[in-house]
């Protein structure tokens, strides 16, 4: 990997999170966690020099790789361009996902994500149940994985926990030592496996209300939930909704479980 970078005279770009995973055991572990079938279509965001891409191609029907850095895309094109199951788009993954014309279902999202945009990429890829990939196996900073896996009331519990877990269930996670990357990153990394829920917990037209409620509830973390909701809803309606859901009006948002946020979403904006 190092000699390829030298040969191609590529100086890595820190802002693009270019820490490449070179450890064969960890790459195999990611492939095992992906449970790939020969019929699977895979979306890989940030393929870099392609160590994961190669294994994904060997184990699936098709890999669509989205790489922002043209220099790396040229290398990928040289490496895999002749394989018909390899598709490459040179662009920003967030813009690609926002474009929204690529239904990801029944795709799998398997990537060592660029860390600076990892959370935004995950939220963008999962926020619409029907279009979300069926399985997600992503490596990113451990701190974000801890937040995704966190239970209510803990320090790391927050917006990302709830947004992802509305449509996805975490299955497993494993830490990847810093020394497995080149160059060695400043933060710890973790791979997390998420599976799309068999049935959505909310109908799709109701999901935006849930996202809005969650974001407002954590607007000022130290405030009570009712005080965060006050500028956005009539207080009589909020108090009645909390009462109907059996939730104390003395709580902060961070104490509410996913189920309670779902109940509150339904109580605050009922279908008429
Ligand atoms: N998958 C490779 C590996 O494991 O060795 C590289 C992973 S590296 C952490 C992140 C990759 O994402 C880099 O190749 C970087 O150029 C690319 N990248 C960064 N920001 C991006 C974005 N917004 N859209 C697409 N690719 C991006």
Image (tube, grey):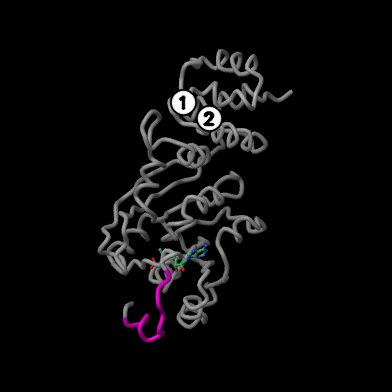
Beta carbon of the mark 1 residue lies under 8 A of ligand 1: no
Residue 69 or 270: which is nearer the viewer?
A: 69
Q: Where does residue 260 sit, x and y in percent of width and height?
A: 50, 24
Q: Nearer the viewer, mark 1 or mark 2?
A: 2
Give the residue number, with chain letter if any, for mark 1: 256
Which quadrant would the N terminus be assigned to in this image? bottom left
Q: Please identify the residue farthest to the right as the structure is shown.
A: 272
What residue appears at the point 49 percent right and 62 percent down from the top-left corner? 45
Based on the picture, tell me whether residue 34 belongs to the magenta stretch: no
Which quadrant would the C terminus be assigned to in this image? top right
What residue appears at the point 50 percent right and 40 percent down from the top-left corner? 197
Give the residue number, with chain letter if any, for mark 2: 217
Left-right relation of 112 to 247: left
Left-right relation of 126 to 33: right
Residue 54 or 38: which is nearer the viewer?
A: 54
Q: If the picture is divided into quarters, which one holds ligand 1? A: bottom left
Circle 1/circle 2 CB separation < 8 Å: yes
Mark 1: secondary structure: loop
Dot 2 crowding, Cα within 10 Å, few <14, some 14–19, many 20+: many
Residue 227 or 76: which is nearer the viewer?
A: 227
Stretch of the chain drawn in magenta = 3-13
Q: Where does residue 77 sit, x and y in percent of width and height?
A: 51, 80
Mark 2: secondary structure: helix
Q: Where does residue 251 sit, x and y in percent of width and height?
A: 46, 20
């Amino acid at each position: 990997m190092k000699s390829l970078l030298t040969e191609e005279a590529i100086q890595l770009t820190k802002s693009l999170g270019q820490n490449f995973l070179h450890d064969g055991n960890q790459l195999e572990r990611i492939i095992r966690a992906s449970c790939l079938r020969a019929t699977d279509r895979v979306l890989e965001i940030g393929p870099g020099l392609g160590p994961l891409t190669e294994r994904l191609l060997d184990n699936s029907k098709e890999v669509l790789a989205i790489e922002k850095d043209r220099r790396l895309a040229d290398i990928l094109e040289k490496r895999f361009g002749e394989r018909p199951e390899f598709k490459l788009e040179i662009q920003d993954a967030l813009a690609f996902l926002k474009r929204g014309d690529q239904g990801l279902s029944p795709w799998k999202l398997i990537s060592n994500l660029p860390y600076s945009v990892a959370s935004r990429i995950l939220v963008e890829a999962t926020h619409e149940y029907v279009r979300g990939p069926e399985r997600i196996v992503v490596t990113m900073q451990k701190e974000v994985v801890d937040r995704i896996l966190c239970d209510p009331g803990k320090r790391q519990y927050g917006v990302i926990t709830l947004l992802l877990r509305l449509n996805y269930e975490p299955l497993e996670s494993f830490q990847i030592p810093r020394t497995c990357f080149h160059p060695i990153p400043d933060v710890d990394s973790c791979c997390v496996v998420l599976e799309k829920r068999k049935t959505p917990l909310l109908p799709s037209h109701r999901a935006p209300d849930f996202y809005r409620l969650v974001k407002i509830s954590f607007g000022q973390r130290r405030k009570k939930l009712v005080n965060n909701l006050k500028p956005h809803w009539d207080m009589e309606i909020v108090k009645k909704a909390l009462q109907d859901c059996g939730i104390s009006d003395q709580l902060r948002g961070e104490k509410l479980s996913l189920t309670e946020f779902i109940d509150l979403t339904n109580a605050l904006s009922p279908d008429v």
